[in-house]
Image (spheres, rainbow, N blue to C red):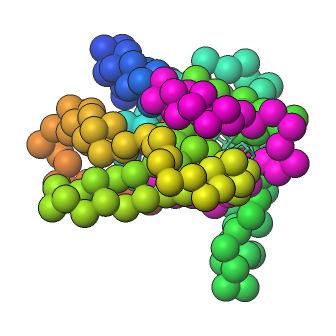
Amino acid sequence: MEASILQPELAAKIADLYDRMEKAYDLVARQLDFTCDGCPDNCCDSYFQHHTYVEWAYLWVGLQELEPERRKGMENRAVEYAAACERALARGERPQVMCPLNEEGRCGLYKHRLMICRMHGVPSSLTYPNGQIKKFPGCFRCQEIVGDRQVVPMVERAPLFRELAALEQELLGARQGELSKVKKTIADMILLGPPRL
Ligand code: SF4
Ligand code: SF4
């Protein structure tokens, strides 16, 4: 039997948080009249590592719902992805490899895609507890739309990150300090199977 470690209540909470991330993103996208339609690029080949067990576990909730054949395809692509990344990293380059969940240009696990995928595109900011603000300009197309505007709508990431951290704490409880830190690509998460907690 597969190790599924996310209780339905916690899965519903992360789904709700993801939904609100999407709404925050859509609000900024609407204000900028920005969509991905007609984009010549596909940013699903951007190299990202992800950092929470709760997102890893929720990704697996989605993978476990797929028909075996589709999941097998993703697993096969994850093997190729991991090998291609290893080669690029060995050359000292940042990998640029299509995400193994991408199917014909679209996310094959859209409802379960991770937070970084949900933030990428529009401008956003991250306000630290000391008041410092880090700004993210958005993807190249969105930057073209923003141009030299003085007032730029942004998704503020901090409250969303805090909620994700709280869900991570809820999942891990007292084990949080004992477990190794997560720093994994989506391919790693696929190939390792659900996190064993
Ligand atoms: S987020 Fe930006 S780069 Fe990525 S597909 Fe959309 S428009 Fe293109
Ligand atoms: S999880 Fe989905 S949205 Fe994120 S990079 Fe992969 S295919 Fe793209």
| Residue 28 placement, left or right of 171 | right
Picture layout, residue 166 above or below residue 8: below
The answer to which of 175 and 2 lies nearer the viewer is: 175
Task: Give the percent coordinates (x, y) of residue 132.
Answer: 25, 63
Picture layout, residue 4 above or below residue 47: above
**In this orientation, does residue 124 appear?**
yes
> Residue 86 occupies which quadrant of the picture?
bottom right
Residue that sits furthest to the bottom in the current view:
91
| Residue 173 placement, left or right of 66 | left
Picture layout, residue 16 above or below residue 40: above
**In this orientation, does residue 2 appear?**
no
The answer to which of 128 and 193 lies nearer the viewer is: 128
| Residue 29 placement, left or right of 98 | left
The answer to which of 77 and 130 lies nearer the viewer is: 130
Tell me what residue is drawn at x 86 percent, y 37 percent.
Answer: 38
Q: Is residue 24 magenta?
A: yes
Task: Give the percent coordinates (x, y) of residue 20.
Answer: 42, 24
Task: Give the percent coordinates (x, y) of residue 116.
Answer: 51, 46
Q: Quadrant of ligand 1?
A: top right
Tell me what residue is drawn at x 69 percent, y 48 percent.
Answer: 145
Write the start and end of the magenta stretch as one range: 22-50
Q: How many marks?
A: 0
| Residue 14 placement, left or right of 43 | left
Q: Is residue 30 magenta?
A: yes
Classify the position of the C terminus by image quarter. top left
> Residue 26 occupies which quadrant of the picture?
top right
Tell me what residue is drawn at x 28 percent, y 53 percent.
Answer: 127
Task: Give the percent coordinates (x, y) of residue 96.
Answer: 74, 64
